[in-house]
Image: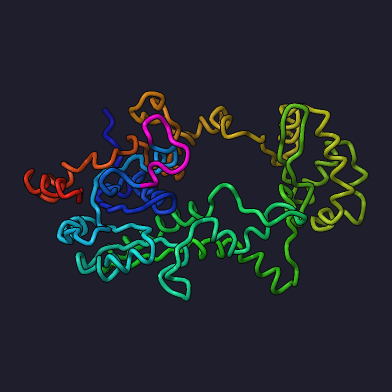
Amino acid sequence: MTPARPRPLEGVRVLDFGRFIAAPYCGMMLADMGAEVFRVDRPGGEEDRRYGLTGPNGSNFVFSNFGRNKKGITLDVLRRDAPREVLAGLVARCDVFLHNFSPSAVGAFALGYDDIRAMREDVIYAGISCYGSTGPYATRSGFDQIAQVMSGACALTGYDHEPPMRSAVPWVDYSTGLLAALGIVLALRHRDATGEGQEVDCALLQTAVSYTSPMIAEALVAGRERPRIANRMPYVGPTDLYRCRDGWVYIATVTDGMWRSLMDLIERPELAAVPAYATDEGRFEARSEIDPHVEAWMAERDVAEVVGAMEAARIPCGVYRTTAEVHEDPHVAAREMLAWVDMEAPGMERVPVSGVPVKLSASPGAVRHRAPHPGEHNDECYLGLLGYTPERLGELRAAGLV
C-alpha cells in the first residue's frame, strides 16, 4: 500500500474566526493543504451558515464549500463575560489566528494583534477587513461590493449608457482570501527562519486597487478612461461573446496573427489588408465595422462547429455555460475542478464544492471531508487539545460560552 503523501501545511494549526467569504476561503486553502483548521462558531452557529440560499440541512452552499476540511468548535469570544483563558489556551496551541471581525469588535473585545500576541508571542495574526488596520477608513466596515465600487472596478463594468455595475462574482473577497493565505505562508516561512511571528494585514479595497491600478494609470497618465463595453475587451478585437445557432461562444483575438487567421476563417481576408485595421487598437476603434462580419458568421453555425473551427485556427475560445452546466464540462471533470461531499442531510448527499485550485505534484492538497456542524469537534479540541475535564467543558456549555 502506497503511504499517504505529506501535505505542505501538515503540523500547522489555525484558529479560524472567518465569516462569509474572504477569511473562510483563506482558511479553506490552508485546510486543503493539510493545516488543521478549527472553524470557530458561537454556540448554535454563525449567520454565514444560513445567509443566502440554504439546502435541506439549513446550511448554505457557500459554507458547504468553505467549511470543508475544517474542524468545528464553538466559543463565544464576543461576550463581555467570555473567559479569556479559554481563548488564550486555544491561541497558545495554534500557529495562526485568522479573522475578519469588524474593526469595532476588534477594539471592543480586545482581539487585536497585540492582544493575541500576548497569548502567544510568535503567533501569525491574519486580519481581513475592508480597509485594513491603518488609514482614515480603518474603523469602517465594508464588503466586497464596497471595494468594487471604490476601486474603480465598477467604472469598467457594464455599458457606458447604463449605471455602473459590480461583478456578481465577489472576486475581491476571493482574491483577498488568496492573498491572506499567501501572507500566512510567507509569515510562517519567516517564523521558521527567525522564530518571529507577525501580523498579516489584508484589505479588500487594497486588493481591488491592486487589480485596477493599470486602468488608474491610463486615466491619470494617458488621460483616457476605459470605456464600459460589457463583454468586449478594450483596445483589441474582435474579442466578445457571440451568439451561435444553439448557444454562445467567446473568442479572444488579441494578436495580428490571430486577426488574420480569424479573417481567413470567416472568409473575409480582404479586411486583414485594410490599413486602419492593422493594429489591435485600430481594430478596436473600428469594431462597429468589423464585428457584424464575425457576428454573421457565428450566427450561421452551431457551437460545436465554431469551437472546432476556432481551435483549428488557433484562436482562443470558450463556450458559455450556465452555473447548472459547468459540471458537465469534460475538462472540469478531468481536472477535478469540482469535488463532491456528503453534507449528511436528505437532499444534500452529494454537494459540489471547489476542487483544490492549486495543483502540487509532490504534496497535493485534497478535499477530505465535509464542512463541520457547529461544535462538532468540541470534545476533541477542549478535552483533548486543551486537556479540560468533562466537568469544565460542561460548565462552559451550561453558561452558553461553547
Q: Quadrant of residue 358?
A: top left
Residue 385 shows in this picture: no
Report whether 301 appears left or right of 143: right
Quadrant for the N terminus in the image: top left
Main SS class of the magenta portion in the image: loop
Report whether 24 appears left or right of 377: right
Q: Position of residue 239 (x, y in %)?
A: 75, 47
Residue 339 shows in this picture: yes
Is residue 377 positioned above or below 223 on the image? above
Residue at 76 percent of width and 38 percent of height: 242
Q: Position of residue 200 (x, y in %)?
A: 37, 65
Q: Quadrant of residue 383?
A: top left
In the rendered image, residue 48 lying in the magenta stretch gets the answer yes
Which region is colored magenta? 47-58
Is residue 379 positioned above or below 120 on the image? above
Residue at 47 percent of width and 34 percent of height: 338
Q: Position of residue 122 (x, y in %)?
A: 24, 66
Residue at 37 percent of width and 23 percent of height: 346
Report whether 54 appears left or right of 216: left
Residue at 27 percent of width and 58 percent of height: 78
In the rendered image, residue 167 lying in the magenta stretch gets the answer no
Q: Position of residue 261 (x, y in %)?
A: 81, 42
Asked whether 135 or 80 is in front, the reply is 80
Label tally = 0
